[in-house]
Amino acid sequence: MYLPGTEPKYFINAGLHGPDAVILDLEDSVHPAQKDAARILVRNTLRAVDFSGCERMVRINQLPMGLEDLAEIISEAPDLVLIPKTEHPQQVTEVDRMISELKHRHKIDRPIWLMPILESALAIENAFTIATATANVVALTIGLEDYTADLGVTKTPEGRESLYARARVVNAAKAAGVQAIDSVFGDVGNVDGLRRCAESSRELGFEGMGCIHPSQIAVIHDAFTPSQAEIEKALKIVAAFEEAQQRGLGVVSLGSKMIDAPVVERARKLVARSRAGAPAPHSSGLNNDVQERH
Amino acid sequence: MTERVELAQNAAGRMVPAMVNSKPQIPYLGVEKYQPRARKAAPAVRSSKDYPENGDKRVPDLETALRKCGLRDGMVISNHHHLRDGDRVALMALQVAAKLGVKDLTWFPSASFPSQKAAIELMESGVIHHIEGSMNGPLGDYCTQGKMRGMGVLRSHGGRWQAIQDGEVHVDVAVIAAPTADFFGNADGSHGKSACGSLGFALADSIYADNVIVVTDNLVPFPCIPWQIQGNNVDYVVEVESIGDPAKIVSGTTQITRSPDRLRIAELVARFLRYSGIMRTGFSFQAGAGGIALAFVDFLRRMMKEDGVKARFVRGGSTRYLVEMLQEGLTDYILDGQTFDLEAVKSIASDPRHVPTSPFTSYNYHGKGNFASMVDAVVLGATEVDVNFNGNVVTHSDGRLLHGIGGWQNCLAAGCTILALPSFRDRIPVIVDEVTTLTGPGELIDVVVTERGIAINPLRQDLLDSVKGSSLPIRPIQDIKAEVERICGGKPARPQLGDRPVAVVKWVDGTVLDTVWQVG
């Protein structure tokens, strides 16, 4: 969940709403005249605020200004840095190098991961090389406002104009072995639109998406969490595969259907994702209480 | 008010004046401890021979009506607040009193509003001696700063009925703004250009006052149907061009909070009711028109639909959200104390299942029961709550009068009383060691829901048991308090209160629960 870096009132309770990560933003949501203040505020926030176990991320400014951001915030060891408007792998390595120097200076042992944001046609074309620029890249994401502006097209709720780019990001991320995270859905009041968008993201292969308001968190979690029927089917497939392995059978079948190895692998991934993506204890699924009681 | 005030310690440990505006007081004795033995008050017996046989009680204007009522120095003049911040009648009456040269009135509104700040000039000029009724905004500041000559008396809606009925307050002249009336004085709030819904807050005044004036901007031929105020209690009827500003009487639409933190609180309240089993077919609840309360109603409505649960009745403050529940068949009735938005006004005017009530039926503690104690759950706000679950709703942490009590104290009688409130406001923790002004005893407050968790009063082991094993964030109130103090940089300094009482808070039985002290 993105939080404007100049709005400390949003920081304190952000973790209560159950996002997987909070992104303290130094870029687009911060007025150019307030960049210095925002840096200090974000640094102090990383130092002082308990985000209830969420990952702590920072979106720095586009380079070269982003390097000034790093000098201020890396001492507080955020979990991840988002690099906006990344178009070349060299930009990623530059950020990585500076983070490495700052970590050394501040005696930080643990990794600080990177998530480049691809926001132009060129960035999309370079997606794989960006994703593989350093070992610290763990995810790719896409910024659709800038991307559609670069294409000179209108961003629509259906998103046909960005289908290629989103699919390309997913493909590059998978090829590089990192996560693909979809862009935010900007219409906070449109819950149905968000749900459709998130479901479409999951179908495309994204493993999560950004959000800009706490009310979007539960909807996104629901959309990205496999349904009970999907989980049950996957569990059956995995069980059938393991049973076949134990019995030394080369061919796996479920009922009358033969199961190929990729199907088993997909089922395993789905089970793993459903376990990892179980709603946090404080998330707001309305049906949780009913399931608890019965 | 410069004389020294004798104080006594009440059962809650609070120092309260022994005399208020020259009347002896009974310090609070504890919940259900005070048993009055007196008989009810009553106005003088009147005879029909003194009233027009044709029923036409109209007089040309309010000045004539007040003259005929014999308004004079030191009297008590009352108004209701159903027209809220749009009301024009209360000030109109007080300004006519000023024109008549009357002094030292006690103004006894069921609540006052910021639009009535001109009452300050009337206090400065000596027309009004003091106000007995909720004060906020400029009037609250005026009182808290010790500028009012008499002491303010804050009562709940039920407590106001009790005070009138028990004779603690004798109303000399009641001036009742009526959105619709006939010449006989029958009056109703659900129709007319200034429609406000129920007129329940004016009912006690109409029954017990010596003189009753109905002021309307929608005079209809007899009979005014329906009527909530009976013309048989009314002395004079005055027709005016406008009794209020419709835009400020009811909001066009009441809005659910958009604050994520407050939405989380609302959802936690609804989940608590669902999981604890309070939300079941035939249950009842009450929630007001604040942003959290509206959001709670919306969450609860969705959960009721999912679980196939229907309420027998809900209590308003009614809004379009309650009306939608009625229309969707999620409740059999709305029992309505006051009507907050246009949809609710429309509903009360047209749907017989949407029933106007009064503080007598809903809240009066000195009656043969009341609805408040029959409600399964009530969701309220507060300015502060302390670690013993005592609540404050009238002053802020700086000691200034901020809100009226409304029905808040009366609602504490519900089966499960829930305070839904953010754990801090503007970096000021809401959970404190001891509330600034005690408005509700902790033994009647069962659950405190904040965005950081739900605290259940240890006295309610049944509620603690009912949510055991749930994923609800149940936490001791001290834990939440400690966390919030960490966030806010420690405990806030206590307000510097003076040693002069400027107002008292009455309990539902008329005893004195606490004192509001001069600030600044």
Image (tube, coloured by chain):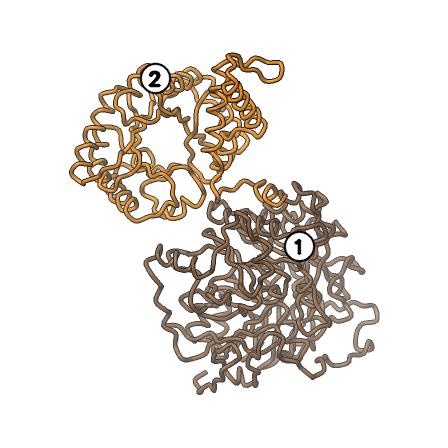
Q: Taking A293 as reference, is B167 above or below it?
A: below
Q: What separation in Å lies between label 1 and label 2 (alpha carbons)? A: 61 Å
Residue ID at (43%, 57%): B480
Q: Amino acid at mark 1?
A: Ala
- Residue A170 figure quarter: top left
Residue that mark 1 sits on: B195
Q: Residue B436: x, y in percent?
A: 44, 69
- Of the residues tagged 1 and 2, which is closer to the observer? 2
In the picture, one chain is orange; tell me its letter.
A
Q: Taking B491 as reference, is B354 above or below it?
A: above
Front-most of B381 and B274? B274
Q: Taking B22 as reference, is B473 above or below it?
A: above
Mark 2, secondary structure of its residue: helix
Residue that mark 2 sits on: A124
Please report, as a chain letter, where disc 1 is located. Answer: B
Residue ID at (79%, 74%): B51
Residue ID at (31%, 31%): A82
User: Left or right: where does residue A107 sit relative to residue B142?
Assistant: left
Q: Amino acid at mark 2?
A: Ile
Q: Colour of chain B?
A: brown
Front-most of B216 and B24? B24
Front-most of B136 and A254? A254
Q: Residue B478: x, y in percent?
A: 43, 61
Please report, as a chain letter, where disc 2 is located. Answer: A
Q: Residue A147: x, y in percent?
A: 37, 21
Binning the other alpha carbons within 10 Å of mark 2 as few (below 14), some (14 to 19) or many (20 upward) gives many
